[in-house]
Image: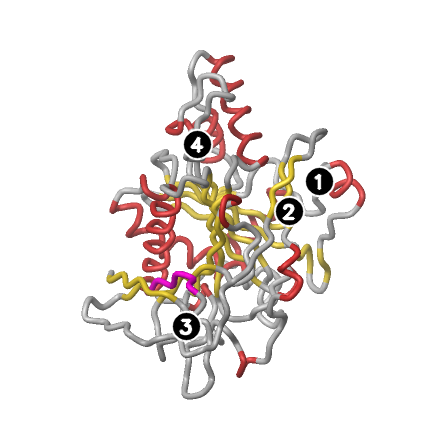
Amino acid sequence: MKKTSTRLADGRELIYYDLRDDSVRGAADRRPLDRTVTTSEIRRDPLLGDSVAIASHRQGRTYHPPADECPLCPSEGDRLSEIPDSSYDVVVFENRFPSLAGDSGRCEVVCFTSDHNASFASLTEEQAGLVLEAWTDRTSELSHLPSVEQVFCFENRGAEIGVTLQHPHGQIYAYPFTTPRTALMLRSVASHKEMTGGENLFDAVLERELADERVVLEGEHWVAFVPYAAHWPYEVHLYPKRRVPDLLGLDEEARTEFPKVYLELLRRFDRIFGENEPPTPYIAAWHQAPFGALEEFDGVVREDFALHLELFTIRRTSGKLKFLAGSESGMNVFINDVPPERAAERLREVASS
């Protein structure tokens, strides 16, 4: 992998990740851009104890542009985009309309390929491996920023999810706090560790899932399963078999196997509802241990956390979506229409031949 860092016309950082070591990236951003101005602010809810990002500048962000005006495609002739070069393998850049900025963190866009009509599932294993390297590198770099406590790599796919740019891409949020979802997990880990005299909750969950009927796909170094209490109609958790706190902890064997396992999962997701259905909308979310202090979680250290990826869709059946209505949105109590065992069975049925 070759990494080349440059700057866009408004000062934002852009980084090329290339498969070839002899790739040359010298194209300049020719757009007449003013410096980016953001209004991101973090406010804490005193009753719930969580944080909300107020980012009014995002109202003006790019919204469903036509394909020939896609800002994530390479620049070509007089059609100038966020990527100055005429081609790329993987590129990462600071979001022009970030939810988090400055002392409130940082947001980046990750373009998986220059092919506008591709998807992550259509990438080769070599291309998917390069995306993993980019995620890992950005996790490392962002973790050293003084304002960052947790790094979250994710992909939103599909208009039903709320995606406004159809080019295959994901995002990275670098939060200035430990997110509520992670804090809940860490509290559960701390409680289980105390009750059992030191047993790791992630290890216990993984051991139980490996012995159950909800395993979807298993390799030498990774295992994917539908969790016992799945929140979403089709939800898969992907774990490395050796517990590590973040992407940086993966060994070479796990990195090598990941593209094959993950691409198979994504391709199965596109077949859940039948070959003639549109691509399945999904969210793919990496859960990593915070880089900040963990004193509030009694007895827990970073190494107690288990890196894992959650992949889920809001489509519950052909032509129907799972909406977060009163119970989910008002009380955070999920109601799942698809039994996890049936979801796992279906995901095994649509395995690649």
Tell which circle, 4 or 1, labels the residue nearer the N-terminal end: 4
Q: Residues within 10 Å of mark 2 (few under 14, many from 20)?
A: many
Read off the residue under disc 1: 334
Give the secondary structure at mark 2.
loop
Read off the residue under disc 2: 232
Q: Which mark is residue 83?
A: 3
Q: Dividing the picture into quarters, in which one does residue 183 lie?
A: top right
Q: Position of residue 97 (x, y in %)?
A: 56, 61
- Amino acid carrying mark 4 in the image: Gly
Q: Dividing the picture into quarters, in which one does residue 227 lie?
A: top right
Read off the residue under disc 4: 292
Q: Residues within 10 Å of mark 4 (few under 14, many from 20)?
A: some
Eye-nearest disc, 4 or 1: 4
Looking at the picture, tell me which residue is in the foreground, 36 or 75: 36
Q: Residue furthest right?
A: 326
Above or below for 124 versus 173:
below
Looking at the picture, tell me which residue is in the foreground, 138 or 275: 138
Eye-nearest disc, 2 or 4: 4
Question: Do the residues under discs 4 and 1 have CB atoms within 8 angstroms?
Answer: no
Image quadrant in which the C terminus is located? bottom left
Q: Residue furthest bottom?
A: 77
Give the secondary structure at mark 3.
loop
Alpha carbon separation for disc pair 4 and 3: 33 Å
Q: Which mark is residue 251?
A: none
Eye-nearest disc, 3 or 2: 3
Question: Do the residues under discs 1 and 2 have CB atoms within 8 angstroms?
Answer: yes
Alpha carbon separation for disc pair 2 and 4: 30 Å
The residue shown at (53%, 44%) is 104
Q: Residues within 10 Å of mark 1 (few under 14, many from 20)?
A: some
Alpha carbon separation for disc pair 1 and 2: 8 Å
- Amino acid carrying mark 1 in the image: Phe
